[in-house]
Image (spheres, rainbow, N blue to C red):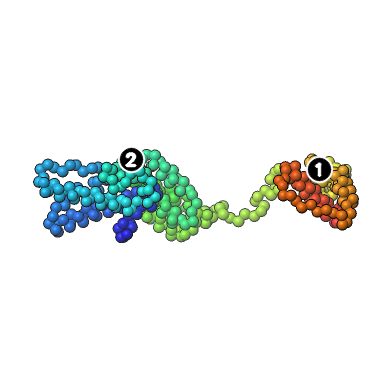
Amino acid sequence: MNSDIQRLVFSGKREDFQTWMDAFRGELQKRWLKARIDAQNAKRAVCDVSYESWLTGVPDALPDTLTQESLQEATLLRDLQNVEIRSLLSKSLPKSYLNQLNVSLIDPAVTVTEIWRMLERDFGESSATGVIGLLTKFVGTLTSDYRHVGDHFKAMSALRNRINAQSVKCFGEPIVSEQLVGALFLSLLPQQYFGSSVKFTKDSFTMDKVFQLVVNTFGSKSKRDILSMSTGFGKSLNKYEFPVGQILANERKRKPDGGQNECFYCNGKYNEGAKVHIKKDCPKRKEDFAKGYYRTSIFKAAKSGPAKVAAVRATRSEVAVGQVEVATPSGGDRTATDMEEAAASLDDLTMQLEYADDCRHGQC
């Protein structure tokens, strides 16, 4: 593939279509000019229509006044142009797109004009809906995050060019000026760093000069780095600026005397007089644990009780050493009840370990 064809390869992305169209038209214009020069140097006839005219419509029929020899020569020259354009399209369009077409690019029943309109329909943004979609993307990109301010400005400029290229087709004029893009972009940056350097005149306030100003001021900084340069953004925040816990979040009031809060196990229902206590010192919790009631608070049902604990202990005492049969699991499916019992046993074990730990530290 030569360099000209490689330059014309279309990526298949909608945002690249306008650029590809311009490059393709430019290639056709170059070939038409070269054909005319070659014909003049060789002193031979040249095709009566340009390459680019095939994209907008089928050329008019050749005049009847031509001689038979001239008519045949003009017809061959037109056919050569037609085939050359089709070949150029087949080499530059994505293979994935060509494979899904229900027509062939070399089918003479399908004109070059129809193929070109099909491409505009599939990839183009020339409708009013397409322009609105580009404007929506423009607004979203303007306030989006970026890692390099220069690259972000270039992306905004490219979107502006796409919008204006399509708006000219729809409305006959561009709708996004370079002054608007520059003003919108600068409005989102800390103005104390460049405010006095901006001159709002037609000659001074251009996209090229705004781009140079932004790069000279902020270099390759990201959006976060730039905004952190402004007052009150990105400063170091200590832990006291955020509410931590129920009291600081105003979900629970602090004790007037600055003392401790109610026990999480009984919520103060078992306080000894006016004296409050914490969970590990709760008398009700110690009483429940001693009886074999294991739970996280008095407001939840216990997972076990004295009868269950006694049954487990009795079962263990009846089994003599050396008389234990080990049953190999069958590997059958477990039921929901089995899973619930396993979960309850695990919870019991956890609570018993917690109680044993309290006793080890003299708190039971």
Alpha-carbon span between mark 1 and mark 2: 74 Å
Q: Position of residue 350 (x, y in %)?
A: 79, 51
Residue 140 appears left or right of 56: right
Is 299 located above or below residue 237 in the figure?
above
Nearer-the-camera pick, 148 or 52: 52
Q: Position of residue 253 (x, y in %)?
A: 74, 43
Residue at image position (14%, 59%) is 41
Q: Position of residue 63 (x, y in %)?
A: 13, 42
Say which residue label 2 marks. 170
Q: Amino acid at mark 1?
A: Ala
Q: Amino acid at mark 2?
A: Cys
Nearer-the-camera pick, 335 or 53: 335
Q: Is residue 91 visible?
A: yes
CB atoms of marks 1 and 2 within 8 Å: no
Q: Which badge, 1 or 2, comes first in the chain's sequence?
A: 2
Residue at image position (43%, 58%) is 215
Can you tell which quarter of the image residue 323 is in? bottom right
Specify few, some or many for label 1: CA neighbours under 10 Å numbering under 14, 14-19, or 20 or more: some
Say which residue label 1 marks. 302
Residue at image position (56%, 52%) is 232
Question: Which part of the image, by quadrant, shows the N terminus?
Answer: bottom left
Specify few, some or many for label 2: CA neighbours under 10 Å numbering under 14, 14-19, or 20 or more: some
Q: Is residue 168 visible?
A: no
Mark 2 lies on a secondary structure that is helix
Residue at image position (58%, 55%) is 235
Residue 136 appears left or right of 110: right
